[in-house]
Amino acid sequence: MLEQELKFFVPESARPGLLTAFDVVRTGSITLNAIYFDTPERDLARAGIALRLRKEGEQWVQTVKLRGPDTLSRIEINHPRPGPELDLQLYKDSAAHAALAPYAQQIQARYQTRIQRELALIKQGQSELELAYDVGHIESNGLKLLVNELEIELISGESITMFEAGQRWLYKHGLILEMRSKSERGDALASLADRRRAKSEPLNLTPEQVAAALTRKAYDLPKPHFVDTEDLEQFYSLSATMSLEQVIRNAALLAGVDGIRPDSALQADYLALMRVGLRRLRSCRKLFKMWLSASEGYANTRLTHYFGLFGQARDQDLVHLEITPLLLQAGMPGPAPEAAPAHLEHDPVQLASAAEFQSLLLSNLQSLICGPTLELQNAPQAEHLVEARISRWFHTIQLRSQRFAQISQDKQHRLRNRIKSLRYCLEFLPSAADKQGLHKVLRECQALIGAVTDVDVALDWYAQHAASPEQAQFARDWLSHARQGRAAHAQHALNALDQHQPQTELLRR
Ligand SMILES: O=P(O)(O)OP(=O)(O)OP(=O)(O)O
């Protein structure tokens, strides 16, 4: 069967309200204790498979979950069992057989979950939804990660109703969209325990320390992450959804999922990678601009507004965490500018956790999952047009690159954005394998122009906010000098683009 569900982290402040709301709709509650299995090399997790034995009330159930057609769906196969013994023979005639058979001998218990689940069955239009409020923990080798989440699963009817209910609960209780399944978190927890044991590090961490240890890195897409399809609409939907998932995952981290309290450097990383996700998403939408459905166009416009707001915060991080330390090291007169500047109009943590933004992420997800995403009925030549657009982007980049030192600051910034858009789109294309090393060159150019544009951001900032005229003068001189050197480096890298040809036939293999 196909399971499709939404998941939300319930922040501490939302818990009493959520419980009260559940009192009204509750249809039951159940204790769920599960053992999850994998090989020591994590072959199942790598393949996106979860295998568990779970005691559901008094009944043992063996379940396997496999990747589904979209990011919210999984193929789920359940078998009631007499006791906690795994039996892989049960899959002999199912889709799971080929996936599990090679590992049958190596499979062993890897982590457990202990969950108290409050249940509600609700009707939404013609659809039936199951609400599950789960409180408990995941455990591996003595390490515990707390769980406090709401799931909304589509039992029957239209996916859109699941999103409608999700919007209501999200808004009412201030929930945070969560993309990580319990098995993903369990696998990360077991890997943390393995690492600590290998280094003879103690395993007596508090749940808060465990949560922090599991969220030390911002979320980036795996490399490579091309979308292997020849269907244009599917290509768009999958690449845009991957980008959006990058945004949602980093937004959850920024918003303090699992009760984490990241320091400002880690917050800056989450924010930077969230913006990369937003840029990836915008690039996909730019490439398919003329065919975007009404809901995609609308979702894009609303997200663009937030892109700007988060951009201001990113600029602040850049000035305070990266450029100012360089200036101080070079001898800039003090006092150092405030670390948490009052000039910031929108705090990124507040912004990311606010119901308005979370709700916007949910409606973007709805648009991509429920579709239609593109309107291609009257566009038989769409593939060629996409390819032509990519070629055009590349030509413009080549032309501007040759004259990087002469073009205006504004055009230099725009050139960097064009390079990013092209690179992000190329990375999604299956037949744009990086045979010529073009992705690498684009990545280098992006980074080196970025070093120049960073200086411009800091120049602006110090012109307005320097603590004294001496500080302003020092910053201006040092940064202007740095700009010259960085621009020369960038020009050098940009010259390499001349040796590349724009690729065509990008979508056909
Ligand atoms: O009860 P399920 O099957 O929805 O599973 P779960 O224990 O909530 O885990 P997951 O995070 O994989 O939905």
Image: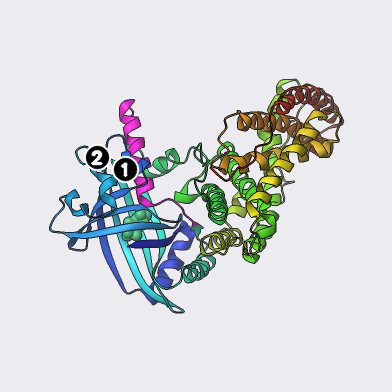
Q: Kindly check if marks 1 and 2 are in contact, taking CB atoms under 8 A apart as contact.
A: yes
Of 441 and 82, the residue lying toward us = 441
Q: Which circle marks residue 103 in the picture? A: 2
Q: Cα distance, mark 1 to mark 2?
A: 8 Å
Farthest residue to the front: give it. 380
Of 309 and 446, the residue lying toward us = 446
The main secondary structure of the magenta stretch is helix
Label 1 within 8 A of ligand 1 by Cβ = no
Earlier-in-chain disc, 1 versus 2: 1
x, y (%) of residue 9? Answer: 45, 56
Point 71% across, 47% down: residue: 344
x, y (%) of residue 488? Answer: 78, 22
**Does residue 486 sit above or below 456 in this rendering?**
above
Residue at the disc numbered 1: 44
Q: Which kind of residue does numbered mark 1 sit on? A: Leu
Q: Is residue 272 visible?
A: no
**Does residue 38 sit above or below 17 in this rendering?**
above
Farthest residue to the left: give it. 82
**Does residue 487 sit above or below 113 in this rendering?**
above
Q: Which residues are magenta?
A: 177-201
Q: Which kind of residue does numbered mark 2 sit on? A: Tyr
x, y (%) of residue 240? Answer: 57, 52
Point 37% across, 44% down: residue: 207
Is residue 195 found inside the magenta-colored segment of the image? Answer: yes
